[in-house]
Image: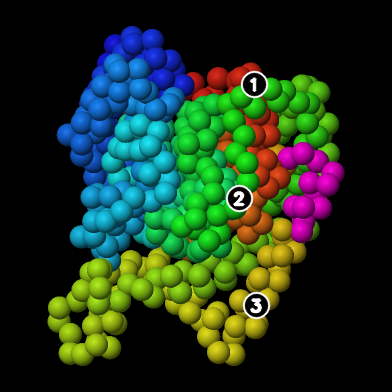
Amino acid sequence: MAETLYYRTASDLNRELESKRISSEEIVRAVIDRTRAVDEKVCAFISFDEDDAIAQAKASDARRARGEALGPLDGIPVGIKDIMAVKGQPLTCASRMLGKFVSPYDATSIRKLKDAGAVVWGRLNMDEFAMGSSTENSSVKTTANPWNTECIPGGSSGGSAACVAAGEAPLSLGSDTGGSIRQPAALCGVVGMKPTYGLVSRYGLVAFASSLDQIGPFAHTVEDAALLLQTIAGHDRFDSTSFKTDIPDYRTELQRKRGPWKLGIPREYFGEGLDPEVEKAVRAAIEFYRKEGCEIVDVSLPHSDYAVGVYYIIATAEASSNLARYDGVRYTHRSTDVKDAIDLYFKTRAEGFGPEVKRRVILGTYVLSSGYYDAYYLKAQKVRTLIRGDFLNAYEEVDALITPTTPAPAFRRGEKVDDPLQMYLSDIYTISANLAGIPGISIPCGFSGGGLPIGLQILGQPFKEADLFAIARKFEQAHDHHTRHPAL
């Protein structure tokens, strides 16, 4: 049975564990064997500790034998993007700057996983400091898309999406600053959810852009994504931006909420630059909802054209501030061939950061500099308020919005690496949700003629993740896209 376990959903695995038909150790060994077999091609992992994972699995099996299971994730492996702190494990953010750093504590999301009995499994590759859309900016390796290893998996959480798509973990965690969960989920054919800003604690998440970053789940199914979000959501006193709100039972709500819903189609998301195959798949999904009794309404988000520009002002400004701490003095890479403190600072950062991180730090420093703050950063914050207002106005009329997740299927490695603007436009449909702080989910909705996955994005009202899960599951239950797997 072991060879079939690695593509089972977390919900299925939990039922098997509860019935004692399998053990957590069997699941973990199957995932380890799968990772050994395919990760040389996929390169989803930066590192993993097999002995530690097996020890966690054995501890889970012992709990279940005593009738003390900690919940539905007890004994289930969860891969971790290498931007979240796990005590005693490397925390590199795929950067030379943190190449030798080992975390002294657990992020809140990791502590919650451990409290739920989940097997914390490995460190997943990413764009350096989460800055990128293709996982080509990692200083360690370039992750491949499991559906076509000549293509990118998306970014910055490319390793998290690819490992689930490839069967190297049934679940994983990523972070989403401008689409870094939803975009790779779409390109790798899995489910990815960006929660409302403040729903999941950012404590222990290495900061890129603090007003935009949010941790969220990757999974094979909507139910599994709901299960993982249920585990990590909730207020945290260690995060000043964490929001105090009741967390519903998302899986119960999935069963209860059946629609029909009033769904908005933003006209700005279906214009120039949208690949015809992506548009065809997304419009077919819209037609499905119409036939299911949902009312489909055309809406406008008039400030959408400004989203990319606003994002790359605010995000780079916050990155410039957050990354100032990497100075070679305390816990980071430290240059040795230096003359004085200033030379240490310059050479350490020149050696430790990759080209994309340097580009964004320079941009962010510029927009925050004297004489340019009002012209760029302050104005961007004002337009950000207008973008959020567009969504809130739309939600007075509709329950959720339906859009493409990405403008095109996965592109080939190296195709856009020398053209930052084209790379940045890969996130054109996802960025606005981060600026507005709203939740969004991407689910598989089809395949291109070349066999690459296409994603459907559903954007919801703040803290209405239960509604998003229900709307997404309605489509998922009527289609088999999520059951298909790459032939690695």
Mark 2 vs mark 3: in front:
2
| Residue bearing the label numbered 3 | 378
User: Who comes first in sequence, dot 2 or dot 3?
Assistant: 2
- Would you identify the image quadrant in which residue 52 lies? top left
Q: In the figure, is residue 130 to the left or right of 385?
A: left
Label 1 element class: helix
- Would you identify the image quadrant in which residue 326 lies? bottom left
Amino acid type at circle 2 is Lys
Label 3 element class: helix
Q: Residue at x 76, y 42 (%)?
A: 265
Q: What segment is highlighted magenta in the picture?
A: 389-400
Mark 1 vs mark 2: in front:
2
User: Who comes first in sequence, dot 1 or dot 2?
Assistant: 2
Q: In the figure, is residue 477 to the left or right of 344?
A: right
Q: Residue at x 65, y 77 (%)?
A: 378
Q: Quadrant of the N terminus?
A: top left
Task: Give how far apart the Cα atoms at labels 2 and 3 are.
Answer: 28 Å
Image spot of residue 423 (x, y percent) = 50, 57
| Residue bearing the label numbered 1 | 255
Check contact, mark 1 vs mark 2: CB within 8 A: no
Image spot of residue 90 (x, y percent) = 25, 52
Image spot of residue 148 (x, y percent) = 39, 35
- On whether residue 67 falls in the magenta region, the answer is no
Task: Give how far apart the Cα atoms at labels 1 and 2 are.
Answer: 25 Å
| Residue bearing the label numbered 2 | 244
Q: Quadrant of the C terminus?
A: top left
Is residue 138 visible in this depiction of the protein? Answer: no
